Image: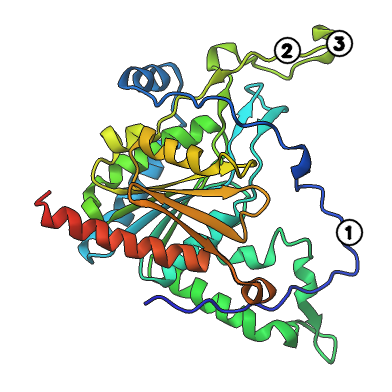
Amino acid sequence: MSQKPVPRPSPPSSPVLSKVHTSAPDTKAAIDRSIPEFPAATPIDEDNYFRLHKSPPYLSQISSDVADFLNFHNKRHRKVALVTSGGTTVPLENNTVRFIDNFSAGTRGASSAEYFLENGYAVIFLHREFSLLPYSRHYSHTGNSFLDYLKLSDDGSKVEIDDKYQKEMFQVYKKYNKATKNNLLLMVPFTTVHQYLFTLKLVAQEMSVMGYDALFYLAAAVSDFFLPSSRIPQHKIQSKEIGSKLVVDLEPVPKFLRRLVDSWAPIAMIVSFKLETDNTILISKARGALKRYNHQLVIGNLLQTRKKKVVFVTPAGERWIELTPDQIKDNVDIESIIVPEIIKLHSQWISSRQRMGL
């Protein structure tokens, strides 16, 4: 059942950590994204990419874990959401010292996974390793030390949770314990863009067993460019050998989002995101992505306001979802509103396909 968004108390103020945050970009200096989009990938693009790049050695283990997870929930007629989260990297060396990264802490994906779980879905969480995770996100990457939630007991003999945070931590842990004890959450990591694409294809194909009960929620920040394996040096690039400049010739990453619909997961509902920095082109870019990739829903959001409002773009039109001033004051996650709305659309999608006899 969908639940009313619950206000969360503010985290503790750390006496030792800086109040300055360097990870957020200067939005006033954001780049111009008005350039044309890359075309959707074709079957030839798919064949070439996966033929010319070596698959991760651990992929067979992930395949086994995912298949077991899906069979478990398929027998129980439970819907499954694949939530992708965090940013991909592009290594510049095989023994990687330098890499190009995508800006994403995984906030959207980690919080959304929690709300899918609260609304009865099982979740495969395909995430950037060491990015935010469901439930533990409340106590990591916050700008505060986890130790600030703790205190010494009165006699100084043990560590306890500070009384101010007991109630909140109890509720978070109870939800986490339910998800893990009932096999509702499967964590699948990636780091590089190659790992992400190989794993996404694998999981998507495995999810075909779920039929219309499969939902893709693609919130990961995927690299637009990559360095082909044939051009990656084995060892660290030496500054003395390259002189005063390092010139990196990157190739565009094939846009595999269309392959989800055409080949990998043709009967699943697919939700993707479109991030922009210019509000004048957000709707047109989101609608262009909807048409190009043939997804059921594209969620548009601006870098500057992504935690406060988003726009749902469907073939039928656009609809804004925005936190109220009171909800912002109470630290309500906008994902607590986004996810129940997507679940309604998923139910409508399933009903419409069944009526059509598909």
Q: Secondary structure at mark 2?
A: loop
Q: Name the residue tied to disc 1.
A: 18
Label 3 crowd (10 A; few <14 / some 14-19 / many >=20): few
Residue sitting at the far left: 357
Q: Name the residue tied to disc 3.
A: 244
Give how far across and how far down residue 332 sits, in percent: 60, 72
- First-in-chain label (2 vs 1): 1
The answer to which quarter of the image holds residue 41 is top left
Q: Which mark is residue 247?
A: 2
Give the residue drawn at x 33%, y 42%. Answer: 204
The answer to which quarter of the image holds residue 148 is bottom right
Above or below, 172 relative to 62: below
Spatial separation of the CA atoms under disc 3 and disc 1: 35 Å
Label 2 crowd (10 A; few <14 / some 14-19 / many >=20): few
Give how far across and how far down residue 80 sits, in percent: 33, 58
Q: Secondary structure at mark 3?
A: loop
Give how far across and how far down residue 303 sits, in percent: 65, 47
The amino acid pointed to by label 2 is Val
Give how far across and how far down residue 194 sits, in percent: 50, 29
Q: Is residue 169 left or right of residue 267?
A: right
Spatial separation of the CA atoms under disc 2 and disc 3: 10 Å
Give the residue drawn at x 48%, y 61%. Answer: 113
The amino acid pointed to by label 3 is Ser
